[in-house]
Amino acid sequence: MKATNVLLSILAILGLLGCPPAPAETIAPASPATSGPVLTTPPAPAVAPTPSGGITAPDLPPMTRTDRGPKNIILMIGDGMGISQISAGMYSNGNHLNLERFPVIGLHKSYSGDNLITDSAAGATAFSAGVKTYNGAIGVDMDTVPVPTILEMAEAAGMPTGLVATSSIVHATPAAFYAHAKYRKNFEEIAADLAHTDIDLFVGGGVQYFERREMDSLNLSDELRRGGSTVASFVDTDVKDLKVDKTKRLAYYTADGEPLPYSQGRQYLVAASKLAVEYLHARDTLDTGFFLMVEGSQIDWGGHANDSDYIISEMLEFDAAIGEVLNFAQRNGETLVIVTADHETGGYAIQNGSAMGRIEGAFTSDYHTADLIPVFAYGPGAERFAGIYENTAIFDKMRLLYGFQ
């Protein structure tokens, strides 16, 4: 017994009996202009080693747009959505989700460039630009150098592009597709990046970062209007009542700051997703295809709050939006739909005592976890999303499917 106590004491001193608490904030670079990001753990390898005797997937050649490749790609991100979040939604919805309609399922490795536990900024940058970067980074690499995103590549190719989110539009996930910022909370800088892109449509909260700015006196909404965009908001028009002119770009604000939870009256995601695909399809007059990212942002917030009901209500709204997008893809025949998450949040589990329609949830954390994350794919090129791969591979696969060099 004495020997055991001594051993336990030694292990405790060495820090081997536990791990530090989850960070309350994501990691920002210290003096990024000169010193680069702060590393809290050794950087993860850019390519994970294959265990002895393991099988690596063969490199896949680029597809041409006429070689079974999709014309349109819709990437849907359920922020914080792991297997338990999906399961809880399914068992709370008559044992069914639209996710069951996907024929191809894979798994991605979510770790970031400086931490086994990614945050949404690094996770979304992996999807948008194909690089592992530090937690807190928006569209920049480990050295804070801007990296081109799939949305920017689509814009350069003359394709209509769009973003829909149930967070503010300057929040980490949507921001990583159009902005290049050293830290995810530089909201006004990120808003300026959005106002100066060629994006065709965005729907999300955050009016204050466009119209009541502290870093300058600009009104970015007025700039968008002068550039020919239709700008509307929840104050004067419900998203379901929007009269859309396909000849103009569209900006629609859903909240002054962050939108409410679904359970408190925010119900625009399904209508906005339907509007977005129809608008971008109609705007694709050159028949080049379009790119759209849709985020169910607040599944993550339910995980941070350790609130099972919050997770389930957000999960079901997101799944309803998935169903609307899948309906379009099935009619269209040239659209690839990808559904995944940046990470799991909360270490969420479905406990003993749960039943269909009654979930007893439990949590191991109020932060993110390092779980492998499911990827669902439907449409031309969907087969490329089977297997286990890095989160950056989602960008690589989209780029190759679009035929971008």
Image: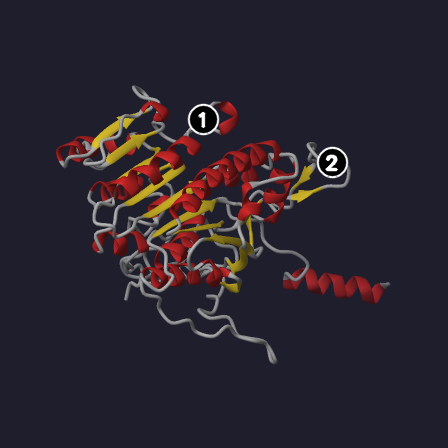
**Which label sits on residue 266?**
1
Q: Identify the amino acid type marked 1.
A: Arg
Q: Residue at x 31, y 40 (%)?
A: 187
Could you say whether the residue bearing mark 1 is in a helix, strand or loop? loop
Tell which circle, 1 or 2, labels the residue nearer the N-terminal end.
Answer: 1
Quadrant in which residue 175 is drawn = top left
Q: Nearer the viewer, residue 291 or 135?
A: 291
Q: Nearer the viewer, residue 343 or 88?
A: 88
Q: Is residue 91 visible?
A: yes
Q: Residue at x 28, y 66 (%)?
A: 405
**Which label sits on residue 355?**
2
Q: Residue furthest left?
A: 226
Q: Residue at x 54, y 42 (%)?
A: 98
Q: Identify the amino acid type marked 2.
A: Ala
Could you say whether the residue bearing mark 2 is in a helix, strand or loop? loop
Q: Which x, y percent locates residue 108? A: 51, 59
